[in-house]
Image (cartoon, helix red, strand yellow):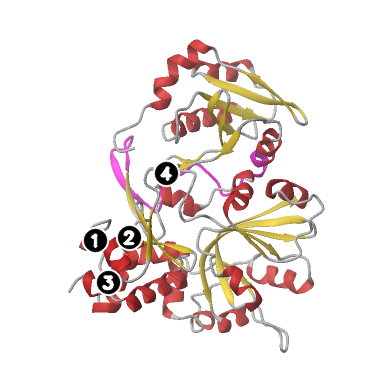
Amino acid sequence: MGIGDIAREHVLQALAECDNLGRQAFLAKYGFKPARDYLLLHDGRRYDSKAIVGVAHRHANGRALGSSDFSGGAATVVPVLTRLGFRVEEGRAGKDPAESSTETRLLVSPAYGRAESRRHWADTLDQLVPFTEAKYARRLTEDQLDGLKQFHPEGQARFWGATPGHDRKMAGVSAGDVVLFTGKNHIRAIGEIGAIFQNRSFADLLWPPKQDGESWHTVYSLRQFEVTEIPYTTLSALLGYKSNFQYPGQLVLSGDRARAGIDGLLINTRTALEDAGAVAPPGEVRELPVERQHTRYTAVERAAQQVFFRRDEAALVIEFRETLTDTTVKRFSSTAGICDIFLSGPEGCELIEAKSRVERSYVREALAQLLDYARYAPSKVDRLAALFPQPLEAKERHLLHHYGIDIVHRVRQGVFERVPASDQARERMRSMWESREPGD
């Protein structure tokens, strides 16, 4: 019995399980990688086609197929799904790495205005909830508990929720989407969604509703969470809203507007890094060589040298971007991580890394990241530049110029100066920028 035995109802059951667990936990549970070539489209959402077929086989024949049990692609998975009435589209292969086919959404969630919201914040954001303890675990389904453990193997996590009035908005939300928790005219915290599911019993234990009140029955955990304080005016400028917009209710943004907020704030989600191969997905353990010691050790992830949200660098980048004209500003993700700025304009393409300080360690970090990211740029890189809040000392300036890297520093509010490397140094280093290691 093979994938030809799968019926439409079996695929729908696999899709429902993926929705219940969340994409990353679903892939990790069954041992699949994110789809690179073909995506299944259903109810406005995209799914990893091979993984869905592999799990649908369990509903048809009692055993899920693993990634190595069958081949995916145009000759196998696509005919099965299209025969059953599903739409399949070509995925990421050949596309700009900055354009993820499973696009990240941006939630703007009021969470710190009313007294009730602040109580919820104190109970499930200020502190971790030990969801594996009996009083919590017995209210979760087996799949929901497994999904939470995939993202939070230590058995505790931060949580937030949404009421039934937001069901339609929340239907497309999944692991890796970004949440901006708002209140008192500021973004109070930034989070990345892990597991997401509907469970009124579990939600009411976390956030007991008032008598005859609504349950926050759509529950999601936070893979990453960082408290911050960003004024609404900054967010509105990124999203294209009026400066006095007050964000009165839950928003779920997608497409260009979501990317503008996420990229503008330099948010680096673990999910995006996992999809790009920069870190290991949840539940995966990789062996990494330690050459200096000539030994081996196991690690849960490969260090990405990046943090979820860098407030100081984000503020600097936002200010710098406001000075740009006739340019397209993007970011792209790769096995090296997520770059800060990738510009395309009249003078070609430029890769820029921002740093909040000018000490040598920060300069060296910018140098290493620029040389690493340049190998994965979606188009030819004409310039590399490092962005700083103030001028560099001569020693640090010479270091970057030796490798053909321009320096851009802030002179005063809204004014930046470029100190370019020599054309000779830039040309000498260009082959290094564009070199790729085997397998990159």
Task: Tell whether 30 sits left or right of 115.
Answer: left
Give coordinates of residue 380: x percent, y percent: 45, 28
Residue 31 vertical position relative to residue 60 in the rendered view, above or below: above
Residue at the disc numbered 4 = 95
Name the residue carrying label 3: 64
Marks 2, 4: nearer the viewer: 4
Label 4 Cα crowd, 10 Å radius (few <14 / some 14-19 / many 20+) = few
72 relative to 36 in the view: left or right: left
Quarter-of-image position of residue 356: top right
**Do labels 3 and 1 touch, CB within 8 Å?**
no
Q: Which residue is mark 1?
A: 76
Amino acid residing under circle 4 = Lys
Label 2, label 1: how many angstroms apart (C-alpha)?
Answer: 16 Å
Stretch of the chain drawn in magenta = 289-314
Question: Residue 117 in the image: x percent, y percent?
Answer: 73, 71
89 or 248: nearer the eye?
89
